[in-house]
Image (tube, rainbow, N blue to C red):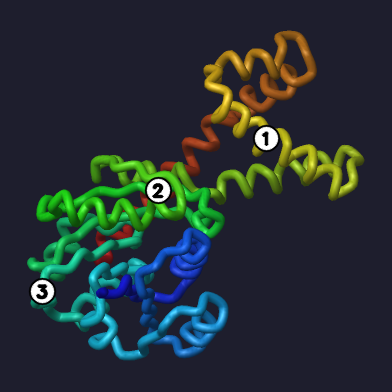
Amino acid sequence: MRATVFLGGGRITAALIAGLRLAKYDRPIIVHDRNPSKLRQLKKQCAVAVEPNLRRAVEQAGLLIIAVRPDSVSDLLRQIGKIRRPVSLVSLVAGIPLSKLRGRLRLPARWVRAMPSPVCRTGRGLTALTFDRAFSRTAKREVRSLFEKVGTVREIPESQFDAFTVTYSSSHGYHALAALAASAQRLGLSRKTALTAAAHALADGILSWRKGGIPLDRLLHEAATPGGIAAAVINAMDSSGYERIIQRGLRAGMARARKNAKRA
């Protein structure tokens, strides 16, 4: 059985491997990275095989996952050179389109872009996929199966990939949690109580929406009764430009994704 090989031993690799271990993934996993300390840490924490030699790592791959920084992609693919047998290559690199990946490493390599969330370490992740034309149904199933082990999978057009990338990040939730709790502390709550209240507002409320099947606008109306305290809070946030601030942030992320594509 050929291995699932990660080229790059950073945070998303560690998160994916943790989720796969939790799901009892039975395919061999190998990690290559130029940094020996990263390999030692992954070997110790995740009980995976490590391979310092790039060529030997690639030769063992049935599924090859590219998990390096955008400015490292071109050099890595140049070092790989050419793959002489069919292999599925999964790029986790934000912003680099299939056309550029395909140009750097041609057939028989088959490319797919994937954008998994670090939350996949708990089995509750979300991954977007967009496949190159060369993918067969069998090869697609293999890739989907990998990411379905660590959460929900959604296949989307590549034209929507950057917008998904700037929207789905768990950083939005963590950032909102930190901001809401900090504001509550300034009103007099202890840090522990502020975090508990803010986490309920965000996590438990959204979980209720996901599981209850009730339209979002109805839940919002129910939770923020016109003329009530919650409605006063929301109205003040909206009048201060809450939605415009979010749009500005997402557009900044899209701009960074386009810069990544130019670097490749």
Is residue 229 depicted above or below 64 in this figure?
A: above
Give the image location of residue 153, x and y in percent: 37, 45
What's the distance in space between the residues labelled 3 and 2, CA to CA?
31 Å
Marked residue nearer the N-terminal end (3 or 1):
3
Residue 264 occupies which quadrant of the picture?
Answer: bottom left
Q: Residue furthest top?
A: 227
Q: Identify which residue is drawn at 55% across, 36% down.
A: 245
Callout 3: 10 Å neighbours few (<14), some, many (20+)?
A: few
Q: Nearer the viewer, mark 3 or mark 1?
A: 3
Residue labelled with disc 3: 85
Horizontally, is 132 left or right of 36 in the view?
Answer: left
Task: Determine the secondary structure under disc 1.
Answer: helix
Quadrant holding the N terminus: bottom left
Residue 64 occupies which quadrant of the picture?
Answer: bottom left
Give the image location of residue 92, x and y in percent: 34, 61
Is residue 48 depicted above or below 243 in this figure?
A: below
Task: Determine the secondary structure under disc 3.
Answer: loop
Q: Tag count in the figure?
A: 3
Is residue 211 depicted above or below 102 in this figure?
A: above
Amino acid type, label 3? Arg
Q: Identify which residue is drawn at 36% across, 42% down.
A: 163
Residue labelled with disc 1: 204
Amino acid type, label 2? Thr
Residue 34 occupies which quadrant of the picture?
Answer: bottom left
Residue labelled with disc 2: 165
Amino acid type, label 1? Asp
